[in-house]
Image (tube, helix red, strand yellow):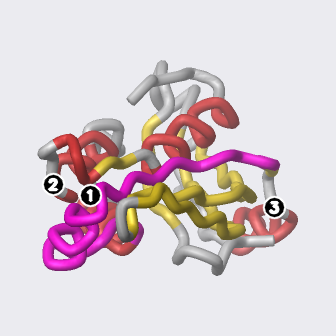
Amino acid sequence: MARSADPEQFARNVATTLFAWDTATGLLPLDYTSAVLAVGDPSGAEQAGLATDVAAYLPSRTAWQDLREYGTSQHLTIDRAYIPDQWGEAVAQAPEGQLAPGTVAYTIEGTRHRTGTWNGERVGSAHKVEFTVFVVCAPTYDTCHLLRLSQLDNPLR
């Protein structure tokens, strides 16, 4: 996954990586999870929660095996990335010192595209998705790191 010191670009990179998978590669969901966790906050404070967040975005191992039969792959087209108004409220309500300097949230709006083969024919689907990416950047770190993800389709607005 591409790192960045720019919070919005980093949030976009996280979103793109999170939704980019292909069951035909031989990789498993855990492999895709590892790629996202590699850019997690090095303090480790949010690592367990982040692992749970990422797992919720990927098919289970059993579902993955079923999807593999159809050669299913997925990617995300981002329509919009923005700092939600609710983030300002969260920052105002946070006790002093709870949020590291450079912590910010970006809500991502986009379309999840899935393709595969059904009865010998290539088929696809597209569904709108929304979620929030919580990152910490400068001055705490030279490059941005991922803290947490909101539930899919339950973003900050």
Report the residue at 63% width, 62% height from top.
Answer: 132
Residue located at (22% from left, 62% from top): 68
Numbered badge on residue 84? 3
Q: Which of the image's four quarters has the N terminus?
A: top left
Helix, strand or loop status at disc 3: loop
Residue depth check, mark 2 versus mark 1: number of the one nearer the observer: 2
Which of the two residues, 140 or 108, is positioned nearer the viewer here? 108
User: Splitting the image into 4 quarters, where does residue 2 fall?
Assistant: top left
Earlier residue among tags 1 and 3: 1
Please state the horizontal and vertical placement of residue 139, each as a whole percent of the image.
57, 27
Name the residue beneath numbered marker 2: 28
Name the residue type under label 1.
Answer: Gln
Q: Is residue 33 magenta?
A: no
For residue 147, say whether it is visible. Answer: yes
Query: Looking at the image, which is closer to me, 40 or 1?
Result: 1
Mark 1 Cα-neighbour bin, 10 Å: few <14, some 14–19, many ≥20: some
| Magenta residues (range) | 57-81
Question: At 44% across and 38% down in the image, what residue appears?
Answer: 145
Q: Can you say whether 98 is above or below 78 in the image?
A: below
| Residue named by callout 1 | 47
Q: Quadrant of residue 51?
A: bottom left
Question: Which sits earlier in the primary sequence, circle 2 or circle 3?
Answer: 2
Is 61 positioned to the left or the right of 153 in the image?
A: left
